[in-house]
Image: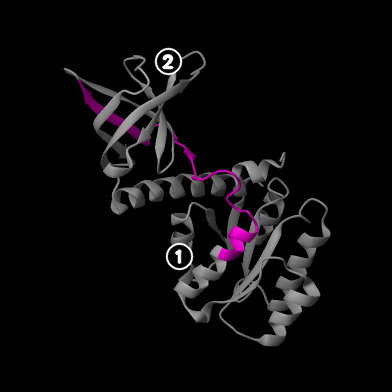
Amino acid sequence: MSDPDFQFGKKVFFLNPPGVLSDVASTLSAHEFEVYLVHNHRNLARFLKKEPHALVFVNIDEGMSEPEWEAWIRGLQGDPGTASVGIGVVTLLGDPEISRKYLMDVGISCGFVTLKIGASKTADILLKTLEANEARGRRKYVRAACPAGTAEFSVPLGDAVLRGTVQDLSTVGMAAWFESAAELPVGTRLRDLQLTLRGARILLNGIVVGKRSGGDGPPVQVVMFEPGSLTDEKREKTRFYIRRVLQDEVNRRLETA
């Protein structure tokens, strides 16, 4: 399948998310969906022209009146540049007439979710919706390119301590430059590898599984983390860093949309 969004996954936006959606977003992130919280509907509408297969869940309780939100959603649907965006509605008000209108008349494709059912049930509904819309694509894990100075590592190996910079990161591995420019053989075990992600330290084990070109610099080496060295807390710290990096990048792009 040639669809790049199926290959790499789809961005999932919550527009004007109420507080309860913070916990829901964390749950979705833990299932390796790429989730963003945004608050500027005008910039988002322009941005979506560059992400035409994204999914957007609109909180119709805040920001504008409900009829204005209906018009905004219909505007996305009617614009050829955003017509393929998947749209859902979230609300604290369980009005069956409003629900029928959006599902039947407006024709939103990602559901009408009443948040008063609680965070756990809301997360279950949204997880099923994202799965149905293949929001993960073929990608199993969300990966972030690490901004300079935010992700480093060190690891003892033999009589030396190797240090370097993380190029990109997921919860299962990293691509990294070693300051020594040494090329470690595939299969090298990196025991007591310490990641430092914006000051948060994570100790785990890894295995070198390959390399890729570093351009004019040293080669980029690919390291997979040993699952047995990852606790839930370590995964959550890694995931928090990834979400923050991705959110910061989307915020920057939204400002110039």
Number of marks: 2
Estimate how packed mark 1 is, as few (under 14), some (14 to 19) or many (20 or more) residues with alpha carbons within 10 Å. Answer: some
Q: Is residue 107 visible?
A: yes
Type of residue at label 1?
Answer: Ser
Q: Is residue 84 left or right of residue 233?
A: right
The span shown in magenta is 128-157
Q: Could you say which quadrant of the image residue 77 lies in? A: bottom right
Residues 229 and 245: in front is: 229
Above or below 231: residue 166: above
Asked if residue 130 is among those painted magenta in the image, a careful observer would answer: yes
Q: Which mark is residue 22?
A: 1
Q: Which mark is residue 141?
A: none
Residue at image mark 2: 218
Give the x, y percent position of residue 211: 45, 21
Type of residue at label 2?
Answer: Pro
Give the x, y percent position of residue 208: 36, 26
Of the numbered discs 1 and 2, the one sitting upstream in the chain is: 1
Q: Is residue 19 visible?
A: no
Secondary structure beneath label 1: helix
Estimate how packed mark 2 is, as few (under 14), some (14 to 19) or many (20 or more) residues with alpha carbons within 10 Å. Answer: some
Secondary structure beneath label 2: loop
Q: Is residue 186 left or right of residue 34?
A: left
Asked if residue 97 is among those painted magenta in the image, a careful observer would answer: no
Give the position of the N terminus as an image quadrant: top right
Please report the residue visible at 78 percent of the width from the left and 72 percent of the height from the top: 106
